[in-house]
Image (spheres, rainbow, N blue to C red):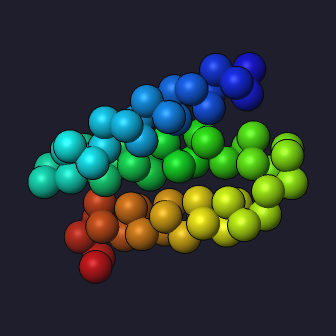
Amino acid sequence: MIDRLSWMGTACMLMSPYLLSYKIGFILGAIGVLLITPPCIKNKQWNLVILNASSFIGYTLQAFNLI
């Protein structure tokens, strides 16, 4: 199950840079980062977990026009 979600997250992350001029690009980025985080936690790749958390916060704030 985690593998399927991480593939969906990867697809979201692949599409999001092309849509960043729209709000959906930031939403896809946030969802993508959120979905690719569980395998990083499972594999104890803490540097990627911190990077993903930071990216999720940034995408979310940008999606709601807070930054």
Number of numbered tags placed on the structure image: 0
Image height of 33 relative to 58, above or below: above
Q: Would residue 22 be found to the left or right of residue 3 on screen?
A: left
User: Where does residue 41 sit, x and y in percent of width and height?
Assistant: 80, 51
Identified at 61% across, 42% down, the residue is 36
Identified at 13% across, 54% down, the residue is 21
User: Where does residue 25 sit, x and y in percent of width and height?
Assistant: 26, 47
Task: Say if residue 14 shows up in the picture.
Answer: yes
Q: Would residue 15 be found to the left or right of residue 39 on screen?
A: left
Q: To which quarter of the image does residue 58 belong?
A: bottom left
User: Where does residue 11 sit, x and y in percent of width and height?
Assistant: 43, 30
Residue closest to the far left: 21
Q: Would residue 51 be found to the left or right of residue 9 on screen?
A: right
Task: Say if residue 23 shows up in the picture.
Answer: no
Split into 4 quadrants, where in the image is the C terminus?
bottom left
User: Where does residue 24 sit, x and y in percent of width and height?
Assistant: 24, 44
Identified at 67% across, 60% down, the residue is 48
Residue situated in front as seen by the camera: 3 or 26: 3
Q: To which quarter of the image does residue 45 belong?
A: bottom right
Q: Would residue 36 be found to the left or right of residue 47 on screen?
A: left
Identified at 67% across, 48% down, the residue is 37
Split into 4 quadrants, where in the image is the N terminus?
top right
Residue closest to the far bottom: 67
